[in-house]
Structures are given as C-alpha cells and as structure tokens.
Amino acid sequence: MKIAPSILSADFANLERDIVLVEKAGADYIHVDVMDGQFVPNITLGPNVVSAIRPVTKLPLDVHLMIMNPERYVEDFAKAGADFIVVHQESTLHLHRVLQMIRNAGVKAGVVINPATPVSAIKQVLKMVDLVLVMTVNPGFGGQAFIPECLAKIEELANLRNELGLTYEIEVDGGVVPETAKLCAQAGADVFVAGSYVYNSDAPKERIQALRDAIE
Ligand code: DX5
Ligand code: ZN
C-alpha cells in the first residue's frame, strides 16, 4: 500500500518544506496536480515547478495532468523529472499515442478516468500502463467529498488485472480519508492520494499514519 500526498493542498510558498515534511513522515510518492484552466476550472503549476521540486526529494513524482491535449507537454514533464505521467482518457483523442509517447520518454505511464467514465473506455490500453488512476471526485479542486459509485470501478480494474495477467497499480484520488481509503483498499486500490486530509492539519505525520492504519 502506498500513500501519495498531493501538494495541491501544500503551502505553495513553502513547497520544499512541505515535501520534505511528508517524505519524512513516510510518504511513498509525491502527487503533483497539473491543471490548465480548460480541462478543469482551476490553474496550478507547470513543468518549471516540477523541475524545481525534483531535487528536493528522492520520492517518485506522480504527475497527474489535468490538461487538454497532454501530448503537447509529455516531453517537457519528462525532462522536468516526472517519474509517472498520468493522463486523462477524456483529455485527448489519441490516448494510445500519448501513452506511447510517455513510455518512449522513459517515464512510467498512467491513465486516469473521471467519475463518469467507465473502465471499458480504457480497456484497450491497460496493457500499456504502469498505473490506473480512478478519480473519486470530479477533478479540479482539493477538499471535495468522495463519490462512492467509483468503488465498483476499482473492483473491476482489480479483476481485470488478474484476468489479463497485468501488474498496473490502482490509484485513487479525491476525498481520501481513513474511512474512504479503507473502502478503496477493500475494493483493490494500492495507491492512495490525499491532499487536504494530510496537509490541512497540524500533524501531517499522524494523518499519514492514520491512513496507513486504515488500509493495512
Ligand atoms: C483533484 C486532484 C487531487 C486533489 C485531492 O482534482 O486531482 O489530487 O489534490 O484533494 P483531496 O485529497 O483534498 O480530495
Ligand atoms: Zn490528483
């Protein structure tokens, strides 16, 4: 089980401090939310911020692209030091090509589906990816409520992984707190993104431990 704190809820004026904090608290990945104001209503950060934070942590950077036509920026995020580049099925007409680009850049490839998108929409590309991200809120903002209807998709992806003999990790993102993390773990999730639960607290270390206790 892996915990991936989302720096969306960190203090952007103190990113280094907030990344080191969760690394020391036992985080497994650093989740980086990239938003363009088009695919989602919010705007966050770009490749320059990814390259700025690259040297401050040894943890893998899990870069979640919430941008239209992500093929335009795969190379930039790869050069910036992303370990995973995760693209939305809904954000491109050529998902297969984008995933090929990510792999050719030597980066782990991930695909993500919004709450309204069924698993069948990504079935054809499952063998190309290292990670499948199931959004458990509508992307764009931290601090939203978990959508329980998404749990069935986690289970479906876990079953497909078995049936097809694949090894992708199943990640969940949005509204993750100990209660919902437990449900996701029972459904088959392996990687848990948490933003506000970890960072909107005086004790992020205890929050990470509470998540771990709930899922292990
Ligand atoms: C939402 C982002 C999430 C966000 C989750 O669009 O993809 O990674 O940081 O925030 P919480 O954990 O607060 O729901
Ligand atoms: Zn995210």
Image (spheres, helix red, strand yellow):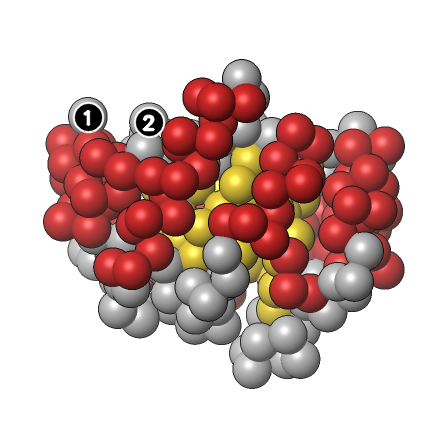
Q: Is 193 on the left-hand or right-hand side of 109?
A: left
Q: Which residue is mark 2?
A: 1
Say what amino acid the circle numbered 1 marks.
Glu
Q: Position of residue 85 (x, y in %)?
A: 67, 44
Q: Position of residue 11 (x, y in %)?
A: 43, 63
Q: Is residue 62 visible?
A: yes
Q: Which residue is mark 1?
A: 216
Q: Which quadrant, please, contains the N terminus? A: top left
Q: Position of residue 187 (x, y in %)?
A: 27, 38
Q: Is 66 on the left-hand or right-hand side of 47?
A: left
Q: Are marks 1 and 2 in contact (CB under 8 Å)?
A: yes
Q: Is 179 or 162 nearer to us in this picture?
A: 162
Residue at screen point 84% across, 46% down: 97
Q: Is 28 or 85 nearer to us in this picture?
A: 85
Q: Which quadrant, please, contains the C terminus? A: top left
Give the mark, 1 or 2, whose residue is nearer the N terminus.
2
Position of 41 relative to 2 (above/below): below
Q: For the residues marked 1 and 2, what is the alpha-carbon distance in whole angstroms?
A: 7 Å
Q: Position of residue 73 (x, y in %)?
A: 81, 56
Question: How many other residues sit within 10 Å of disc 1, few (<14), some (14-19) or many (≥20)?
Answer: few
Residue at screen point 43% across, 57% down: 135
Question: How many other residues sit within 10 Å of disc 2, few (<14), some (14-19) or many (≥20)?
Answer: few
Residue at screen point 64% across, 64% down: 90
Say what amino acid the circle numbered 2 marks.
Met
Q: Residue furthest top?
A: 165
Q: Is residue 203 visible?
A: no
Position of 143 relative to 172 (above/below): below
Q: Is mark 2 within 8 Å of ligand 1?
A: no
Quadrant in the picture for residue 69? bottom right
Residue at screen point 30% across, 50% down: 151
Q: Is 31 on the left-hand or right-hand side of 88?
A: left
